[in-house]
Image (tube, helix red, strand yellow):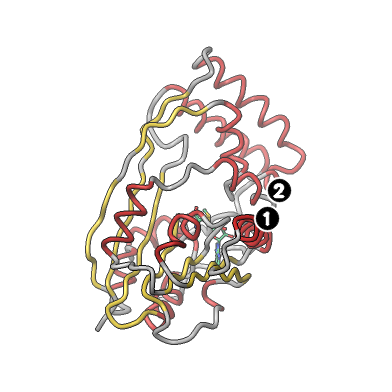
């Protein structure tokens, strides 16, 4: 079964929004992941499709070495700037598609992919990851919910506004047509199992968060489906419409959500 192909420029122009508006993974989650994967300060972490380093910076002090890899150069620029500003020398930030990465065999103790595995050629990346991990090393898929992802009035209004402007801007080429069917038919766990990984467990760390309208707009600009590049000349109209919808729902301008944060942990073959 061939992997689905995504455009490679989906996150062009999102890095600054990504870094500012994405809510960090809770410390409870990253601490738990470090503990369960046996991180003791001596090993190596590979953060694949790292964005601006949400996992890298949360876990760098649990590993002697971290590789942060993303195919979007702007994301890697931000990782490099943040590492330099913080004086962190253990992070190697590389521009590469995950499936094209060249890395030594059995070099990593943990491979982590945050909000990303669904956008990767999963079979190709899982097969390579199995080779890059030491025997019985860990692989973690981290996930979090976006501001639209529950059923409050302001969230339904946000979803409807997103749909309206995606249709208006003709944003139809960000996700392959077979995406939903393929992902349901071949789950992440099944794809990883075919490459010798065993499911160790799934762990949830929900967080109550109160968004402002600025943060919701900024978050949406950090996505591949409603980036300013995707919206083009319609970005200002979208933003005005969304702000009006949000204000109608919550005149106080505070938008409360229980955000889901989860990770799924796998163990590589011995
Ligand atoms: C939603 S962001 C996730 C960023 C970060 N890992 C996190 O946990 O928030 C998805 C990232 O995957 C990157 N990406 C998408 N496809 C990729 C691929 N084939 N290889 C490497 N990076 C990829 C994008 O450039 C983007 O930075």
- Left/right placement of residue 126 relative to residue 90 reads left
Q: Residue 64: percent from the left, percent from the top? A: 45, 72
Picture residue at 65% right of the left edge, 49% below the top: 14
User: Quick one: quadrant of the N terminus?
Assistant: bottom left
Q: Choose between 235 and 13: the one closer to the eye.
A: 13
Which residue is identified by label 1?
Answer: 12
* Front in this rendered view, residue 186 or 155: 155
Q: Where is residue 237, by image quadrant?
A: top right
Quarter holding residue 134: bottom left
Is there any visible trace of residue 158 in the rendered image? yes
> Does the residue tagged 2 have its C-beta within 8 Å of any atom of ligand 1?
no
User: Label 1: how many residues lie within 10 Å, few (<14), some (14-19) or many (20+)?
Assistant: some
Q: Quadrant of ligand 1?
A: bottom right
- Which SS class for mark 2? helix
Counting from the top left corner in percent of width and height, residue 15 is at 64, 51
Instruction: Find out whether the residues at labels 2 and 1 contact each other: C-beta distance under 8 Å.
Output: yes
Q: Residue at coordinates 27% horizontally, 78% vertically from top-left?
A: 136
């Amino acid at each position: 079964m061939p992997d689905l192909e995504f455009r490679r420029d989906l996150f062009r122009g999102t890095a600054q929004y990504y870094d500012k508006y994405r809510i960090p993974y809770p410390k409870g989650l990253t601490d738990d992941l470090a503990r369960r994967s046996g991180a003791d300060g001596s090993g190596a972490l590979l953060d694949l499709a790292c964005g601006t380093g949400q996992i890298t910076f949360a876990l760098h002090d649990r590993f002697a070495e971290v590789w942060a890899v993303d195919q979007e150069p702007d994301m890697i620029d931000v990782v490099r700037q943040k590492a330099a500003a913080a004086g962190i020398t253990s992070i190697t930030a590389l521009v590469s598609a995950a499936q094209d990465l060249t890395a030594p065999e059995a070099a990593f103790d943990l491979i982590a992919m945050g909000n990303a595995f669904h956008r990767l050629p999963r079979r190709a990346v899982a097969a390579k990851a199995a080779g890059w991990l030491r025997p019985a090393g860990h692989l973690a898929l981290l996930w979090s919910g976006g501001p639209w992802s529950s059923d409050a009035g302001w969230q339904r209004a946000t979803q409807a506004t997103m749909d309206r402007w995606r249709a208006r801007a003709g944003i139809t080429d960000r996700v392959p047509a077979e995406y939903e069917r393929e992902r349901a038919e071949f789950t992440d766990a099944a794809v990883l199992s075919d490459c010798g990984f065993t499911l160790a467990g799934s762990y949830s760390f929900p967080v109550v968060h109160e968004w402002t309208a600025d943060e919701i707009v900024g978050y949406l600009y950090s996505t591949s489906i409603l980036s300013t590049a995707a919206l083009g000349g319609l970005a200002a109209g979208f933003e005005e419409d969304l702000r009006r919808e949000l204000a109608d729902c919550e005149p106080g301008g505070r938008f409360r959500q229980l955000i889901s944060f989860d990770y799924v942990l796998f163990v590589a073959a011995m």
